[in-house]
Amino acid sequence: MVILGLLLMISGIFSLLLGYLIANIGFDINLLSSPNLIASLDDPNTINALKTIQLVQQIGIFIVPALLFALLCSTSPLIYLRIKNRPKTFSLIASIIIMIFSIPLINFLAGINESMRLPEFLSGLENWMMEAEANAKVITTAFLNMDGRKDLVINMVIIALIPAIGEELLFRGALQNLVIDWSKNIHLGIWITAILFSAMHMQFYGFLPRMAMGLLFGYLVIWTGSIWIPVFCHFTNNGSAVLYTYLNQKGIISDELDNVGTGNGDLTYIIVSSLIVLMLLVFVFRNKQTPPPTIVT
């Protein structure tokens, strides 16, 4: 755990500095000296600089530490991270369907999360959380403002592909293995990792749905023995949000899908979609391609 923490800290600091340096040189903009970053988000140059920094940071914070950790702690790093195991076609198809039918349940959990309030004596903390959430939403909205297919492809890489690979390598590949090895309990390892996965995003009013997805990804990697299943699920979740936003901005689809599961009359959607997801998970579990893989150290 200490080794992984040191790798995260060193690589994170280096990637942050490198990202700012590239943004400064490539876009002739110094974000560190910007008095009000939120107010300058209407400038395409600022958005491109921020996307560049995010791309560099995602590689430096997630992918690099996970790979270095596996190299340092295992004689078979690709097996340790479960990279070598090729998933079954059925598992890939099932993962897409699972993520699609999870939308009502995820929206329902998000609604519960957003309605939660802290006690009065923690009002200061709650105000800070709400302000941080609002600022994150403004930046996310600016990132998802897409004029054409080029912006769609860039966002698919930055928001969907790289996070799916990087976060799954770090959390389901490195950290989950580490916690399972420490606790000697698969379920405890999956739950602790899912909690840390959600907390890491620092988006407090999306904690419950993100933790639920972390649990799903954690069990899928154990049942299938392949990191590529949760990577594919993660990409499907993020990528569908990017594609949905793009199509909505072009007027091709409405914004009703984003609210499925949040209305008072949507209980049927939640129950049916949850049952479909549960049945698919049972099929994936019963048709797992390998027994739960042992951790190679």
Image (spheres, rainbow, N blue to C red):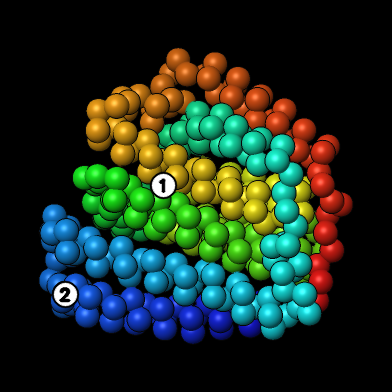
85 and 18: which one is in front? 85
Q: How many marks?
A: 2
229 and 122: which one is in front? 229
Q: Which residue is mark 2?
A: 29
Q: Quadrant of residue 39?
A: bottom left
Image location (x, y in percent) of residue 88:
74, 44
Q: Quadrant of residue 93?
A: top right
Q: Residue at x 33, y 70 (%)?
A: 53
Q: Check the image and report above or below for 122 versus 184.
A: above
Q: CA distance from mark 1 to mark 2?
A: 32 Å
SS for callout 1: helix
Q: Give the amino acid at mark 2.
A: Ile
Contact between labelled residues 2 and 1, with CB atoms less than 8 Å apart: no
Q: Which residue is mark 1?
A: 205
Image location (x, y in percent) of residue 115:
40, 37
Q: Check the image and report above or below for 75 versus 284.
A: below
Q: Check the image and report above or below for 144 versus 73.
A: above
Mark 2 residue crowding within 10 angstroms, few (<14) / some (14–19) / many (20+): some
Q: Give the amino acid at mark 1.
A: Tyr
Image location (x, y in percent) of residue 259:
39, 28
Which quarter of the image is occupied by the C terminus? Answer: bottom right
Left or right of 150? Residue 75 is right
Left or right of 290? Residue 192 is left
Mark 1 or mark 2, which has the lower sequence index?
2
Q: Do we see residue 122 in this rendering?
A: no
Q: Residue at x 83, y 54 (%)?
A: 292
Q: Which is closer to the viewer, label 1 or label 2?
A: 2
Image location (x, y in percent) of residue 170:
59, 66
Residue 242 is tagged as: none
Q: Residue at x 13, y 55 (%)?
A: 42
